[in-house]
Amino acid sequence: MSTNCIFCKIAAGEIPSDKVYEDEYVLAFRDISPQAPVHILVIPKTHIASAAEVSAENAELVAACFAAIAKIAVAEGLGKGFRVITNCGEEGGQTVHHLHFHLLGGRHLGANLL
Ligand code: 5GP
Ligand code: ZN
């Protein structure tokens, strides 16, 4: 656990969250400020600062996040589609420095990324 990391604290149960999925490696919970009808954050329980810190050594955790995303999408009724976003670093707009994937859906999100 990384000191003062809010998502490590959520993963440890020290800060409450609206949990939608959990397994040995992954936790998923609803974003506190949703940008779409479904807006879920999917995180590895182990601290990885961002996508820039993904390596061959920890890539299994990223794979576990995506396996969870596929299951959550079904559970949330996102059969028509969804979007997965990870913000990385200052110019990428990352505000919480613990790797997380935004799972967005529940409406037509459009073709533009920005
Ligand atoms: P970022 O901007 O780093 O990609 O995304 C961080 C996300 O975390 C934001 O969408 C923000 O609303 C969400 N967030 C920040 N703090 C909390 C929190 O304490 N609980 C939950 N559920 N979401 C949070
Ligand atoms: Zn963390």
Image (cartoon, grey):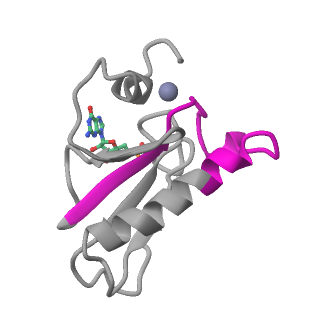
Magenta region:
38-63
Quick one: quadrant of the C terminus? bottom left
Residue 26 in sight in this render: yes
Q: Nearer the viewer, residue 68 or 88?
A: 68
Is 32 drawn above or below residue 13 in the view shown? Answer: below
Residue 29: % across, % down: 30, 45
- Name the residue at the right extreme: 56
Q: Is residue 17 left or right of residue 23?
A: left
Q: Which residue is depicted at the point 40% across and 87% down?
A: 111
Q: Is residue 31 left or right of residue 1?
A: left
- Name the residue at the front extreme: 24
Number of on-image labels: 0
Q: Is residue 104 left or right of residue 54?
A: left
Residue 114 in sight in this render: no
Quarter where residue 78 is shown: bottom left
Q: Which residue is depicted at the point 36% across and 49% down?
A: 41
Residue 101: % across, % down: 46, 53
Residue 54: % across, % down: 71, 44
- Name the residue at the top extreme: 3
Q: Nearer the viewer, residue 6 or 73?
A: 73
Q: Which residue is depicted at the point 61% across and 34% down?
A: 48
Residue 80: % across, % down: 32, 87
Q: Is residue 94 left or right of residue 20?
A: right
Q: Is residue 56 within the magenta segment?
A: yes
Is 48 drawn above or below residue 100 in the view shown? Answer: above
Q: Which residue is depicted at the point 59% across and 33% down?
A: 49
